[in-house]
Image: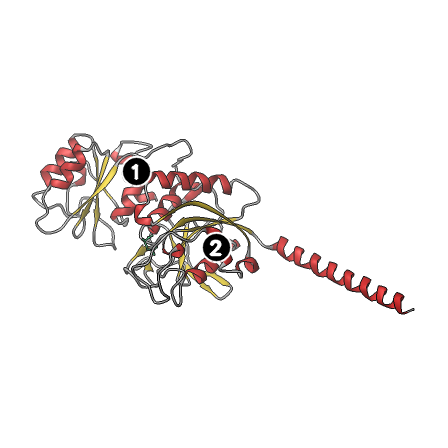
Amino acid sequence: MLFHKSARSLIALFGFMLCLAGAAQAEQAKLRNVTILATGGTIAGTGATSTTTVGYTAATVGVQSLIKAVPELADVANVTGEQVFQIASESMTNAHWLTLAKRVNALLAQPNVDGIVITHGTDTLEETAYFLDLVVKSRKPVVLVGSMRPSTAMSADGPINLYNAVQVAASQDAVGKGVLVVLNDQIHAAREVTKTNTTTPDTFKTTELGMLGYVQGNRVAFYRASLRKHTVDTEFDVSRLESLPAVDISYTYANVPPTAINAFVAAGDKGLIHAAVGDGSIPAQLKPALVEARKKGMIIVRSSRVGQGIVARNGEANDDELDFVVSDTLNPQKARILLMLALTKTNSTKEIQRMFYTY
Ligand code: DGL
């Protein structure tokens, strides 16, 4: 009798466990599938002590360790990880961008991948984000995330930034918003966000045109969207590209000589971003070098070191006469990216100016 009683309770317990397992599986099946592509940076960095927030080593922790450090990720998405490369992002190159873009597009073409998070150093994070914003061919969320403190630091911001980035990548509301940047509980558009402080966790800002939303606890809240074309709506396709046209940036300041411009021309660059003072002004001592560069077929884009505002066409220079292009509101480092991609399609300044007013 006793045997039957305990057998029955064991069977009941086993049945209960099976139901629990089934319910957990059903829950897991409801979660979206997010792939984390790790590239290095401070989020994967380590320091000697818990108070080492500068002077640490970036790009030392692997993607599986990053995932293991945030077990809560499993509550918000089915997460897998890939180590695409392991570098400090100041060393990011065009070749890295092409590799990353091709991997992102290959993954997003898979029906079982709902979104991607890219862990990345913050120094060039905004550039990688904008490059991907122009070449990713999917409406699925792609979210770049980094941190300003290494993983070993007291109050490291990496884990919460990663958790928030995965929540955004798993959010239906992030679909079709273009490539996003998530740090410090904020959601920014790739086109306008920029790093504004060398070391503080609130460094990423979209100063005038405004960030897109917040992550608050487990809530992803969008308040606006970028009006400029991106991802599936651009004309750029890198799938068959093995390199990008050479485009560099000449920085401007009082007393600047034409040395850098002449060097880029001699190097055979296809395009040059004039990172000007003010509204794209051209110092008298630079104008002959820029005119000569244009004569040699180089596309010249007037941008500005100021960082905010529109560089007005035919404002500080007669662009119609000089056959120059203006960057609209793109800062020099992002204008370089758009000009490189534009040059994979055309050498027409009229067409390139259209692209700067479109993307
Ligand atoms: N070396 C810098 C980089 O990888 C560290 C900055 C960071 O990742 O926050 O971008």
Q: Nearer the viewer, mark 1 or mark 2?
A: 2
Q: Position of residue 112 (x, y in %)?
A: 57, 45
Q: Position of residue 227 (x, y in %)?
A: 38, 50
Any part of residue 5 in sight: yes
At a point 20% along the width and 30% down the height, the residue shown is: 297
Residue at point 20% right, 33% down? 298
Residue closer to the observer: 349 or 104: 104
Q: Amino acid at mark 1?
A: Met
Q: Amino acid at mark 2?
A: Ser
Q: Is residue 312 visible?
A: no
Marker count (numbered): 2
Which quadrant would the C terminus be assigned to in this image? top left
Q: Label 1, label 2: how many angstroms apart (C-alpha)?
A: 35 Å
Position of residue 106 relative to residue 49, above or below, is above
Q: Percent x, y for residue 231?
A: 42, 43
Q: Residue at x 35, y 52 (%)?
A: 121
Q: Is residue 196 left or right of residue 260?
A: right
Image quarter where ligand 1 lies: bottom left
Q: Nearer the viewer, residue 241 or 298?
A: 241
**300 relative position to 29: left or right:** left
**Residue sticking out furthest to the right:** 1
Judging by the rendered image, the residue that carries numbered circle 2 is 65
Counting from the top left corner in percent of width and height, residue 40 is at 39, 50
Q: Is residue 334 left or right of residue 61?
A: left
Q: Residues within 10 Å of mark 1 (few under 14, many from 20)?
A: many
Label 1 sits on residue: 340
Say which element carries label 2.
helix
Element type at mark 1: helix
